[in-house]
Image (cartoon, coloured by chain):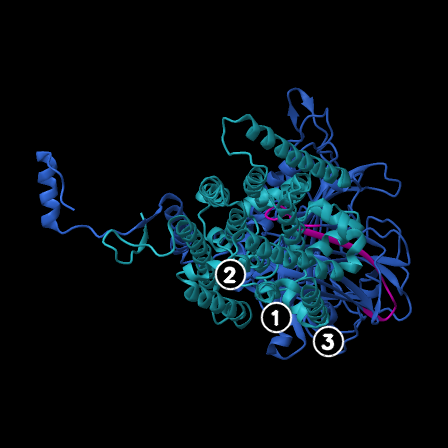
Amino acid sequence: MQSFGISLDGTKNGETFAPAKDQFQEELVIRPLHSGDIYASFQFRTLWDTDFLQEGQKKVSHYRLFPKSLGQVLSKFSVQELHISFTQGFWRTMQWGQPFIPSPPGAELWVWFHDTVSDVDGNWKELTNVLSGIFCASLNFIDMTNTVQPSASFKPLGLGNATDHRFLRYATLPREIVCTENLTPWKKLLPCGSKAGLAVLMKSEKLFHSSFHSQAVHIRPICQDEQCTSKAWELRQTLNVVFDHYTSGQGKKEWSLFKMFSRTLTEACPLASSSKVYVDITDNPELSPATPLLSQAVVLGDRRTYSVYDLTRAETFGQLRSFNLLLRWKGDNMLRPLLHAERYVAGFGLQTGEIHTVIYNNHPYRAFPVLLMDSVPWYLQLYIHTLTVTSKSRDNKPSYIHYQPAKDRHRPHLLEMLIQLPPHSMTEVTVQFERALLKWTEYTPDPNHGFYVGSSVVSALVPSMVAMSTNFTQDQPLFSSFVPVKEESSYFVRVYTEPLLVNLPTPDFSMPYNVICLTCTVVAVGYGSFYNLLTRTFQVDEPSPPLAKRLANFIRRIRGVPLLA
Amino acid sequence: MAAPLTLLLIVAVTIRAVLFRSSLAELISERVEVVSPLNAWKRVVEGLALLDLGVSPYSGDVFHETPLMIYLFHFTVDYAEIVFMVSPYFVDCLSCLLASLDRAKIAIGSNNLKSDLLFNFPGCLRHIISFSTCGLNNAIIALFIFCTLKGSALLSGILLALATYQSIYPLTLFAPALLFFLQRLYIPVNLRRSSFWCFTLQYAFIYVGSLVVITGLSFFLLGSWDFIPSVYGFIFSVPDLTPNIGLFWYFFAEMFEHFRLFFICVFQINVFFYTIPLSIKLKEHPVFLIFMQIAIISIFKSYPTVGDVALYMAFLPAWSHLYRFLRNIFLVSCVLLACSALFPVLWHLWIYAGSANSNFYYAITLLFNFGQILLVSDYFYAYLRREHHLTHGLYLKKKDGTEATLVLK
């Protein structure tokens, strides 16, 4: 391992720190997709053998490869696991297959707190604000009105002692837009920044000119070996992007790194222990420069062959000290995704509606259960008695339903169901809702655009057609080791549906003063009528005498003389 | 009297049953003029479904019925139709009774029983197939009035407690009921007399006691006091701004946050505020006072529906002898009819067609409430005027012998 930076053998206060055992790996996977687009997935992993949360030790203050801002966040808020993703675009499962790392459109944040935390909500609030600053995103819009505590979905992906779902918080901001401002701080968290290694390819003008762009940070504690004798913290930064030059009309199924990223690779990150580029050659594309290194991996139930380019070896870069991959392919052979979900809103008008979630099980003969999690904002009032789950036009009763109704202006609806999907079928989940009229200050500046409802999450252990390997090796490529494989015959998949855009009835925003005046007028009319009738009595109307007579009576009264009639 | 009454009741049952079975029932039960977040049947079903799922119905913000409703409907949810068909009859029978009672007291006017029920019918028509618990609330209030008129203080107190428990506003009916009993027992309304206080305390004890018992029973149903903020907190703080025929929703949708609490207090006090002045003015006429109170509640409550309007309109035939003193009856009927026709039209234009906005529906709301206020104050004027004529004679003359005009001064 080339050690580029300054290695500190620190002595502080007369004590010696052992050098922190951390390592950094980076990899890029390029996969041509069935529809002609190309999928590039970057993963950067830092493993650090330390313990942020252990008490009685001095606080960790010497950061080398692990970014200090994230380390401080973890120790201050006692975070056990943190997953944050920013996505622009929607992953089209039926055309592109399953992604290595799924993410919903917008921003998604889910966190497991350590079970020593006493005020989880307070920590959550501060954490979202701090992360908002770190990533230059508006995560401060995450508050109790869009945070839920799923009871069955989102179990810890790393080691987890805390399985009490009171320590889990999940929030999603479907409206969040991802741009260069979010990419720059994300790149800064990398040990080499964007100056060396694979991160050099990440130029925003090309990355955001794509169908799908997702950048994420996943932090979790993992076991370092099979017996789990030592634990380490793993930080994975992933960036998935799908370039659509073919479908957007540029014609040929021919790609190069330069064409995709407008850059070529010149060197590996000196701090990285491994720096590799994997290209999916299962469909036998033409690849240049060729490489003898091949690797087979079973990811998401699919065995595929990859060409491996090791960037830590100087010969990869050739004479020109620059690595540009050229790819030309013809055939398309995609494994049909076994699990797929869609969601849409039905109904017309601004009073009621129906949310339909359709889940497809494309396995020819196996049925398997899926966990569907729906988080609907409070202003769409769900009626759970109208919930129907039908498979193959017959009622399919979920075996587990956890429903937490919304409290207006406090928390959203949470619906989790365990549904058994029959083989080769379509299951439809429908629920009716009513749209609420909000106070005029609660609308966004463009109220007629509509309100976003976050994606539903479908999690399942899908039976695999190909045996998966449960061996734990350090040399596994990163893209195949994101989700721990517990058994050979099934793999874990999380599918996100589309977010929904729902219109709410709006009051007239130009009218507050008028409305107050008019309503108070009507109330005052009522008050006035009753006041008159209550305080006055009926009298016979005697017309008042003419002026002359009144004057005469006035003078007579002064004189003390009897008055005129 | 029994035979035509039974015949009319049978006809009414048939018509109602037919309408319940038609597709009109579902359409009407969704309309905002007819159901409100407090009494929609859909929400009752939702609450029961939540209970079946093991979640407290009050943990969300969809169910705002009292726990006794859960008790009632848990067992009769399949027979709900029958419950809703039966309850409006109490109101019908009561209006007949009122009419006949008043006639016996006053001995003016024609003996036209049929006109009563027919008058009452359009009022109830709007809400008979509405599938809302408003019908049950109206039935309880009608029973309370019936027991009061029959002179049973115990039953009257219990039923008033039940009505107050359902929605807080019938609290204001305590004063007229008390005045009626005092009048019946020939106890003068004099704060210095011990007989007055004796009876008042007895009645208040019955009322408050039953209220406490009913509230305690509700606590034991679900084992928590959650229902108090969910039901009574909801009625008072008006968090749900679903459009209805009342004045609250748009007002608080457009309210500046800073003043919200102030105006909530003002609007809620407005309902209870007329009790004492009206009781002082109408202490000799408690039956009319009950009518006035019910009307004021129906107009100014936080979530009114046409069911509440139908309740006080059902009693209008009892004051048919006031017709000659009404000043604006034509205007008022035109306004109310026009508004009833325009409500669904403008709702459709706002919500479904998208070519109108909320201001149109709001304007009709304003006009409807204005018409109601005009109607109630007109009847009040007519009643007071008739009382004046009863004491001073029907044809009044001025000092010089010409015909006089009466004015309010």
Asked if residue A358 lies left or right of residue A465, the reply is: left
Label disc, if present, on residue B109 of the rendered structure: 2
User: Which quadrant would the N terminus of chain B be assigned to in this image?
Assistant: bottom right
| Residue type pointed to by label 3 | Trp
Label 1 or label 3, whichever lies nearer to me, is: 1
* Mark 3, secondary structure of its residue: loop
Q: Kindly identify which residue carries mark 1.
A: A348
* Mark 2, secondary structure of its residue: loop
| Residue type pointed to by label 2 | Gly
Q: Position of residue B129 (x, y in %)?
A: 67, 65
Q: Position of residue A421 (x, y in %)?
A: 85, 64
Label 2 or label 3, whichever lies nearer to me, is: 2
Q: Nearer the viewer, residue B395 or B233?
A: B395
Write down which chain is painted blue.
Answer: A
Q: Are marks 1 and 3 in contact (CB under 8 Å)?
A: no
Q: Is residue A346 visible?
A: no
The single residue placed furthest to the top in the displayed view is A14
Label disc, if present, on residue A106 of the rendered structure: none
Chain of the residue displaying label 3:
A
Please give the range of residues in magenta. A405-426
Instruction: Using the numbered discs, state the Cα–Cα distance from disc 1 to disc 3 in whole angstroms.
Output: 46 Å
Same chain letter for marks 1 and 3: yes
Chain of the residue displaying label 1:
A
Q: Kindly identify which residue carries mark 3.
A: A329
Question: Dot 2: within a 10 Å radius of its alpha carbon, few (fewer than 14), some, or many (20 or more) residues?
Answer: few
Same chain letter for marks 2 and 1: no
Q: Is residue B161 visible?
A: yes
Q: Position of residue A510 (x, y in %)?
A: 40, 58
